[in-house]
């Protein structure tokens, strides 16, 4: 299938292309320099990759190889992380046991854990292997590379798995097991400090006292608050592509609170492209939700998992803006939705 045909027949591809086009359009009225606007457009090029990848992956053969590549790369990512953890390989620049950074790693591994759960449920021959990989992924997320985003995603994905596969009684047992495990983790593990810190910052933000400073609420909450102010200045079309850093500096001149993005994809798009751009992004997410239900069960389940991961990551980070997460999400969305109007059904490893 050629690209024009893909855009015509696949709404997920079309909505991704529309958002990319809107970033290009936003460069025509931006307050940023032309260089900054072009740089921002290029950072969102993953949106263009989605329809391109979908047009390539319309056959079972190519999708099968894509899923195999995902499986192998996820195992390598997990394996290298443990080698770093045990001192065989050096840690990354941030001091984490991951290739790039804690956030990207935790997003990747959380979905891999979800993938392994489904494979373990379906496979009698390799069930022990997939369960072992699930346990290794879960341990990695909470004790080796404890990224809060990934931890929240994997909990949400386990709950999604229970909804997809089990009845009400089993779902209740899973909820109780998650609650019990989290209670033990928060009270007895020193690795839970980041979650405790996040809870404390949230409480401080929701219940501020006069002597608190803006930074004591947590930088992320300050970024969100200021981003909403910027959106209120130009609510319809925003300040233009690439304008966030400049406009934020104008509003918050304090260098200690400076930010190049609000660590929230909805606000990042809203400040630059206004409510129109935000509506297009929400339409992109909605198209995945709606058309995932039209896929065969296995593809539907994974597509729903990718969508849930993208939404959660979009609340706490800017996954389409960030290089690693952006390319990963673009690839996984394409793999899941390429069969929507493809030539045959997907094949899973």
Image (cartoon, grey):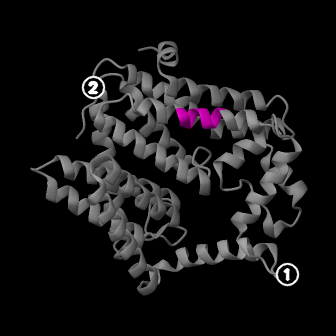
Left or right? Give the position of 301 relative to 61. Answer: right
Judge the density around disc 1: few (<14), some (14-19), many (≥20) Cα neighbours within 10 Å. few
Main SS type for the magenta part? helix
Q: What's the residue at 70%, 29% (across, down)?
A: 22
Numbered badge on residue 249: none
Q: Earlier in the sequence, mark 2 or mark 1?
A: 1
The numbered mark at residue 345 is 2
The image shows residue 349 at horizontal and vertical percentages of 22, 41
**138 w.r.t. 203: above or below:** above
Q: Is residue 248 magenta?
A: no
Residue 328 can be seen, yes or no: no
Q: Is residue 285 magenta?
A: yes
318 or 301: nearer the eye?
Answer: 301
Query: Is residue 307 visible in this depiction of the protein?
Result: yes
Residue 210 is marked as 1
Q: Say whether residue 257 is left or right of residue 109.
A: right
Q: Which residues are magenta?
A: 280-286
In the picture as drawn, the residue positioned furthest to the front comes out as 168
Mark 1, secondary structure of its residue: loop
Residue drawn at x 45%, y 85% as measured from the top left: 187
From the top left corner, tell me how far across and down residue 283 is, in percent: 60, 32
Q: Nearer the viewer, residue 267 or 33?
A: 267
Please give the name of the residue rendered at 84% of the width and 41% of the height, measured from the top-left corner. 32
């Amino acid at each position: 299938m050629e690209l024009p045909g893909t855009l015509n027949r696949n709404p997920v591809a079309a909505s991704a292309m529309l958002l990319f086009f809107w970033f290009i359009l936003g460069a025509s009225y931006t307050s940023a320099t032309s260089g900054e606007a072009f740089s921002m457009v290029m950072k969102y090029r993953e949106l263009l990759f989605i329809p391109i990848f979908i047009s390539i992956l319309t056959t079972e053969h190519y999708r099968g190889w894509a899923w195999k590549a995902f499986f192998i790369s996820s195992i390598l990512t997990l394996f290298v992380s443990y080698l770093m953890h045990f001192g065989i390989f050096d840690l990354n620049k941030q001091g984490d046991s991951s290739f790039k950074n804690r956030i990207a790693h935790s997003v990747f591994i959380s979905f891999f854990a979800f993938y392994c759960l489904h494979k373990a449920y379906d496979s009698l021959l390799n069930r022990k292997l997939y369960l072992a990989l699930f346990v290794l992924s879960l341990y990695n997320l909470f004790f080796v590379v404890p990224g809060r985003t990934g931890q929240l995603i994997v909990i949400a994905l386990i709950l999604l798995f229970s909804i997809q596969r089990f009845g009400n009684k089993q779902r209740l047992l899973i909820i109780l097991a998650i609650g019990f495990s989290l209670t033990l983790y928060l009270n007895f593990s020193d690795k839970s400090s980041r979650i405790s810190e996040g809870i404390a910052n949230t409480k401080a933000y929701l219940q501020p006292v006069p002597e608190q400073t803006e930074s004591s609420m947590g930088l992320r909450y300050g970024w969100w608050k200021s981003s909403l102010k910027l959106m209120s200045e130009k609510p319809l079309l925003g300040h233009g592509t690439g304008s966030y850093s400049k406009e934020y500096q104008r509003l918050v001149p304090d260098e200690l609170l400076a930010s190049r993005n609000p660590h929230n994809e909805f606000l990042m798009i809203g400040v630059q492209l206004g409510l129109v751009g935000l509506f297009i992004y929400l339409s992109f997410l909605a198209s995945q939700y709606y058309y995932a239900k039209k896929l065969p069960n296995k593809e539907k389940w994974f597509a729903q998992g990718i969508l849930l991961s993208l939404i959660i990551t979009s609340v706490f980070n800017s996954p389409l803006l960030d290089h690693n997460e952006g390319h990963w999400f673009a690839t996984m969305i394409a793999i899941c939705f390429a069969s929507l109007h493809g030539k045959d059904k997907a094949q899973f490893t």
